[in-house]
Image (cartoon, rainbow, N blue to C red):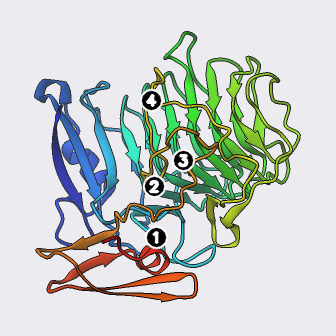
Amino acid sequence: MATEVIKTIRAVGGDYSTLEGWNDGEARNLLEEEVIAVGEMYHDWPNGFDGVLHTTNAWGSNETYYPILRPAPGHKHNGRYFVSGTSGALTGAGIRSTGAGAIQVHYSYMRIVDMIVICDTPSQNSLLLISIGSKAIGCLCKNSPDGFTGSAISVSNISGRAINCVAWNSFYGITLTGGGSGTGNEAVAFNCTAVGCKGVGIGNGNTGQKLINCLAHGTTDGPDIVPGLEGEVFFCATSDDSDLPPGQGNRTEQEFNFVDPANLNFRLAEDDTGARGYGQDLSANSYLPFDVDIMGNPRGVAWDIGAFQYHDEPDVIENLVVDDATPSVTAHTDVGDVHFVTVEYEAEIDRVDLENLIEHGIPE
């Protein structure tokens, strides 16, 4: 396994205080060093870091040695964009750019993982994967629904990958506009969700793209999914009558039951019949094998369509960071259907995902 060289991105006290500072300071030939260059971003900017990451400095990289931007431990989103409602403070580390395009990946094989990426400028992409083999995994993305173009996520080159990502309230949700012929060269979107977008929820270009296990719902001015000329769309589901190829596991005109869509919780509810159990197992796919959902929960045997896999257990509590201490469970209390857990610490708590604690408690 390749060694990770980790640099922190913080408002104060980190190795870098901006994303482009990290990129400019760390860009080099990673193949010579045989390392993965990690930028770990902290949730030090409650409403999102108002800046951009345009990777204009050259990285030497491949599928084994590459740069990656991800949240620091304990600073990942909780599956929702905002702490409350549809605006305000973010639930985890992220970018909220008022400039031109929040993230533009111009060098090959870079990975953007578990980030919230928002661009409020009309007609701009929030996350543009323009380089060969670049990847967005587990991200919550949004661009402005105003203007005349722009995507929450645009996969625009050979071997680009969008996996377990969500697009919401964007002009275009997730678009695949690049790709190459031949297995492995296609631009792909696997297990992605697009909700409430304007022009297109999820769209293929003409050739060299593939969609599997994607869910699109509530596109206002266009189709939920555009299949493209080659029709490489499999086990996808839409709320409208998108013209998806028959006989490939696709489902149109479905009703999806999300846990709390008004507060942007697009997890599938227990009684969902539109997407639960209708996906294809991608744990051994040749593009980028994975077996978990956006929150790190196992996909299990019956895969769901979309970024979230239904499960009746608490999410893995990644957003709990405690320095030099082990939690001590001192009491359990049931109030109606809600189970509360009392936990005591003898240490400073850096950050706690309170929503997760309130909703699920901490497992013993």
Q: Amino acid at mark 2?
A: Met
Image height check: is 240 above or below 338?
above
Q: Nearer the viewer, residue 192 or 226?
A: 192
Find out whether the residues at labels 4 and 2 contact each other: C-beta distance under 8 Å: no
Find out whether the residues at labels 2 and 1 contact each other: C-beta distance under 8 Å: no
* Residue 123 location (% of width, % of height): 66, 50
| Mark 4 → mark 2, Cα distance in angstroms | 26 Å
| Mark 4 → mark 1, Cα distance in angstroms | 29 Å
Find out whether the residues at labels 2 and 3 contact each other: C-beta distance under 8 Å: no
Question: Dot 2 lies on which element?
Answer: loop
Density class for disc 3 (Cα within 10 Å; few <14, some 14-19, many ≥20) is: many
Residue drawn at x 53%, y 61% as measured from the top left? 312
| Mark 2 → mark 3, Cα distance in angstroms | 10 Å
Question: Dot 1 lies on which element?
Answer: loop
Q: Amino acid at mark 3?
A: Cys
| Sequence-wise first label, 4 or 1 | 1
Q: Which residue is mark 1?
A: 91
| Mark 3 → mark 4, Cα distance in angstroms | 18 Å
Q: Nearer the viewer, residue 356 or 2?
A: 356
| Sequence-wise first label, 2 or 3 | 3
Tell me if 11 is positioned left or right of 297 in this view.
Answer: left
The quarter in which the N terminus is drawn is: top left
Q: Which residue is mark 4?
A: 131
Whether residue 267 is visible to the viewer of this picture, yes or no, is yes
Q: Nearer the viewer, residue 82 or 14?
A: 82
Residue drawn at x 46%, y 42% as measured from the top left? 136
Q: Which residue is mark 2?
A: 295
Q: Amino acid at mark 1?
A: Thr
| Mark 2 → mark 1, Cα distance in angstroms | 13 Å
The quarter in which the C terminus is drawn is: bottom left
Density class for disc 4 (Cα within 10 Å; few <14, some 14-19, many ≥20) is: many
